[in-house]
Image (spheres, rainbow, N blue to C red):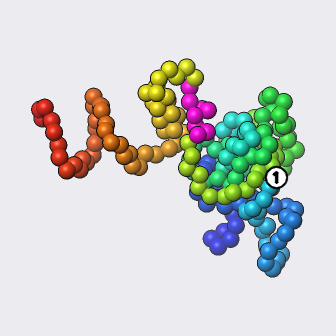
Amino acid sequence: TSYGVRKSAGKYDSDVFGVVATSPRLVLGDEASTTVRVGMLGRVPTIVSLANGPIKIGSRVTASDAVGVGMRAGRPGSIVGRAVVPFDPANGVGTCDAELKSKLIEEGVVFTNPDECVGLVMVALDPGVDMTIGNMLQDAQEGILTLTDAVAALTNTAFEQGAELTQFVAGQVVAQLGIFDKVFAKEVHTEKL
């Protein structure tokens, strides 16, 4: 609602700040019939899908494209916390919960992949914006031989996953071709224009 709690509304929803808690240990404040208990601290079972791949211990959990369902974060952005346990049914870690998925579908949740695996994962809540790029390294292609290849692979992976470059600061840039809308400089040295 405009002044209340709502389920996440798409991949990497920037408004996520917690997980609905069905059995909280401690409730602060007065409760009414319309109260929604949202966990923002501690460990809370969280509904997740494999929409962005298997979840490992320590994986950052964010909103998926299925309303109210989490997934492994593959780029910087808003997260609800980090997985305390892995979820990788293809490798025997956790199981896909067909009953939970059916219940979600009955509630109107739409999965872009009808075969999407859904389950519960314990998440250590720490909502906020996570700007680390370390987990993107695991998604970069294998066979990287040089630092230049590694930076290129990481950059390509980041952009493929939706990252945006808003500012780039460097002591020196060497390029054969650069395309810019505007260039601001104190000095410009060139061999020819």
> Is residue 140 inside the magenta stretch?
yes
Residue 154, how many percent across, how many down? 51, 33
Query: What amino acid is at disc 1?
Result: Pro
The residue lying at 22 percent from left, 49 percent from top is 185
Residue 171, how many percent across, how many down? 33, 42
Question: How many labels were placed on the picture?
Answer: 1
The residue lying at 73 percent from left, 62 percent from top is 40
The residue lying at 84 percent from left, 50 percent from top is 103
Up-down: is 108 above or below 55?
Answer: below
Q: Is residue 17 left or right of residue 149?
A: right
Please give the range of residues in magenta: 134-141
Residue 157, how many percent across, how many down? 52, 34
In this orientation, which residue lies closer to the viewer: 3 or 131?
A: 131
Quadrant location of the C terminus?
Answer: top left
> Is residue 100 inside the magenta stretch?
no
The residue lying at 79 percent from left, 29 percent from top is 90
Up-down: is 76 above or below 129?
Answer: above
Residue 114 visible in the current orientation: no
The residue carrying mark 1 is: 45
